[in-house]
Image (cartoon, rainbow, N blue to C red):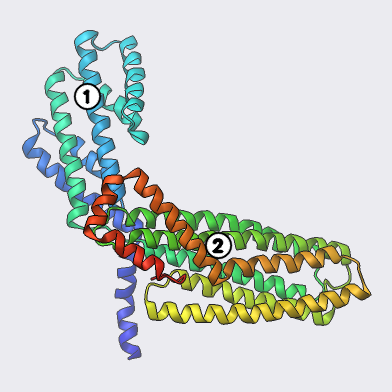
Amino acid sequence: MRDVRERAAPLVRLVRRYREPVVVQALRSSAAATVAYVIALRLSPEALPLTAPLTALLVVQVTLYATLTNGIRRVNAVVAGVLVAIAFSLLVGLTWWSLALLIVASLAVGHLVRVDEYVPEVAISAMLVLGVTTVGDTAWSRVVETLIGAVVGLGCNLLLPPPVWVEEAGASIEGLARRLRQLMLRIGEEAAGRTPVEQAAARLHEARRLDHDIVEVDAALRQAEDSLRLNPRVREGLLHKVVLRTGLDTLEICTVVLRVLARTLTDLAKEREPQPLFPPGTGETVERLLSEIADALVSFAVLVTTSVSLNADAAEARLSAELRQAATTRDKLARLLLEQLEHDARQWHLHGAVLTEVNRILDELDTEHRTSRLLEDLDRVSREQRARMPRLTRLRERLGVQEKLWRNRTGMDGRYL
């Protein structure tokens, strides 16, 4: 059995490599550009119809939603540029001052037709068309090539459906939770002994650098959200989107609180140096409490990224048990800090701040708090969707899709279905 796994390892790595966004994008774009060029050779009067593969290359994106929106905007940009070039060729021709006016007019038209990032494409198309002799033939051939590239790009995603990047986003969320866990474990170990100010400050800087990790996870989650939109292979995409987004929001809040906790311990180290941050028994309790919360963070991430009901039940049970144990340890820490306050009231505000910040993390990870937040976000997103797309909402209600979503919503208990 071990030999089989070792022999299959290269194949598994190849499959995983194939699913990476860069590889998927390169393969799909290359195939679409090649097909568009072959078709344009037969339909376009140009000898080298490079506009078609260029359009297909720019239109094809990793997700179906991005492909559709980019294709429409790019076609609009090219057609608008061609029309502006035709108008200028009939009125003034090509001179240095007409070129300047052409660029200004093209950019203005690009903003008027709302092609977003393709505004420069309007001016580029206009200059390319205006710079040739046979303006009429070139204009129409450029429009034809653009349409060929856009149609091929759209067809490529319909025939070869793009992957759904939910698993990749879930892996990013779990990775963030595990980095939070490692930092929290180190903070707990140092809190149990004598912590130099420099060491406590180093942990504070580590907590601040987690903001960059959140930005990367957010980018992966946005890609997953785009892959869920208009994807025929995805059912209940709204529910997946809200579950992952609220999960990341919770981890982001925990990251902020952990940064505040690191700052509190740094201030405490400055006040008590060279003494320990806490008495021996209290320091050990702080270490155990942070260790239990760190494990709960990973269990929470596993819960929100688990798609199988059985695994979700196990993840929820594990998280609930870890939160109960952490709450018990938190109560013990509160009693120890209260006893310490009776004998030594120095730095009582910092000790109380540690307890407050721990409570905030436990409240954010609480399953009941998460369930109520999920329901609120689903209500909000559903209202916004109905207001933005009333016809689509009525169609979904006629097909029974909306009713099924609401049944799952009312029966949801904070799990990733």
Inspect the image, locate mark 1, and give the three-letter code of the amino acid beneath it.
Val
Label 1, secondary structure: give it. Answer: helix
Residue 250, numbered label: 2
Q: Is residue 102 left or right of residue 277?
A: left
Image point 30% across, 45% down: which residue?
Answer: 390
**Of residues 347 and 338, which is closer to you in this image?**
338
Farthest residue in the right direction? 343
Residue 82, numbered label: 1
Farthest residue in the left direction? 42
Q: Position of residue 321 (x, y in %)?
A: 57, 82
Farthest residue in the bottom direction? 1
Q: Residues within 10 Å of mark 2 (few under 14, many from 20)?
A: some
Residue 70, numbered label: none
Inspect the image, locate mark 2, and give the three-letter code of the amino acid beneath it.
Thr
Image point 36% across, 49% down: which residue?
Answer: 385
Q: Position of residue 50 (x, y in %)?
A: 19, 36
Q: Residues within 10 Å of mark 1 (few under 14, many from 20)?
A: many
Q: Is residue 222 above or below residue 182?
A: above
Does label 2 or label 1 sit earlier along the sequence?
1
**Residue 49 visible, this orientation:** no
Quadrant where the C terminus lies? bottom left
Quadrant where the N terminus lies? bottom left
Q: Position of residue 261 (x, y in %)?
A: 72, 63
